[in-house]
Amino acid sequence: YFLAIEDHFWISSVELKPGMLNDAGTKVAVALALSALVYYVGSKNTTKPAASSSKGPRKLSLVQGQGSGFGPKDSVTVRVPATTANMGPGFDCIGMAVDIWNELTVERADAFSLTNEGEGSDVLPTDETNLVVVGLKAAFNAAGQDLPLLRIHCRNRIPFARGLGSSSAGIVAGIIAGLVIAGHELSVLGKEELLQLIDRADAVFNIGRSAILVNALRNGNYNELRHATQDKLHQPQRGAEQYPHLFPLVDAALEAGAHACFLSGAGPTVLAICSGKSGDIFTQVAAERDETKVADAMREAAASVGVQGCVFITNPEHRGAHIVRVSPKISDHLVARYEGDITDL
């Protein structure tokens, strides 16, 4: 479960069950949580040998706004999850998605419009400075096309400006929606740069903890998470200069039974990992679970430093950004046999 307190910061707690991470990290993905990659199959290579004569001819429409296929589309709806980055020592390289979603719908229109619903709707811009539009522009620029007139609606459920990836979710949603509307395939290359000088001993400390963290999550060794999520590169600095609530909450969560507790992203979210006994959570009795005990302890610690807020509960999420609806459809077929020809799909 994931509990969060807002206003001045967020408190969080994630519930993990034994074994839920053992299938290649499906529930807690050790991955770059702030990026998404979408592939679209390109147009058929005209130099490719003709398909076997035993197959009848099939038509694939790539006309803008008509039929199915991989060409330009009239509308698309995209969902992008909230993310928690760093998870203690994994500065800018370890994170996970959580089951809180933003949904973006983009349609071709006769005039530009942008509306916001939900989190941040009273402060988010409704013009081209909105990060969704930034993502859309990037996608159309990559496709070599001008940004068309679009009707854009943002349904935001990710808490705004709380270290849960709302900004990156807007950009990612815009990029994916733009690629679909433009009908463009994009290959993504990423590059990370070290922007600050750090002490070698601190770097070694974090590298070691990151390795322990990945192994603990992969094998379900939750008892190791307390030490695996320790950090020396960003949390001490942020706790001292920005978030005096950070370490009181970490200490309170661990004392109450959390496996781990750390700053989510750049904060002010504080996230704690908890677990119950094996089996479905709905079959467990209260004595087998400790997330409410941890949440109450974190609330009390927050009150002791003069901070208030509200609580959210959710789960780790193995899905990333994905397309919910698109018109015209990419494929008219529920099942298709692929034999090496794009027209099979």
Image (tube, rainbow, N blue to C red):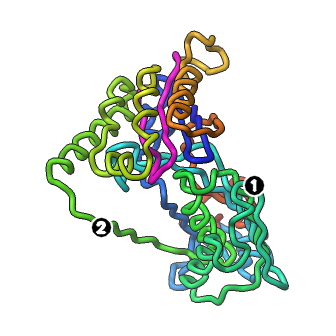
Q: Residue at x 82, y 84 (%)?
A: 111
The part of the image, by quadrant, that contains residue 169 is bottom right
Q: Which range of residues does the magenta coloring cover?
A: 259-277
Q: Residue at x 45, y 26 (%)?
A: 252
Task: Check disc 2 and report the residue beneath it.
Answer: 195
Chain-order first, disc 2 or disc 1: 1
147 lies left or right of 17: right
Q: Residue at x 73, y 67 (%)?
A: 76
Tell me if label 2 and label 1 are in contact, CB under 8 Å: no
- Residue 66, percent from left and from top: 80, 78
User: Is the N terminus in the top left, top right, bottom left or bottom right quadrant?
Assistant: top right
Labelled disc at residue 46: none
Q: As rendered, which of 34 and 188 lies closer to the eye?
A: 34
Indicate whether residue 141 is drawn in magenta: no
User: Is the C terminus in the top left, top right, bottom left or bottom right quadrant?
Assistant: bottom right
The part of the image, by quadrant, that contains residue 321 is bottom right
Q: As rendered, which of 312 and 288 lies closer to the eye?
A: 312
Q: Amino acid at mark 2?
A: Leu
124 lies left or right of 93: right
- Residue 272, percent from left and from top: 48, 33
Indicate whether residue 262 is drawn in magenta: yes
- Residue 206, percent from left and from top: 25, 45
Q: Amino acid at mark 1?
A: Gly
Task: Check disc 1 and report the residue beneath it.
Answer: 118
Name the secondary structure under disc 1. Answer: strand
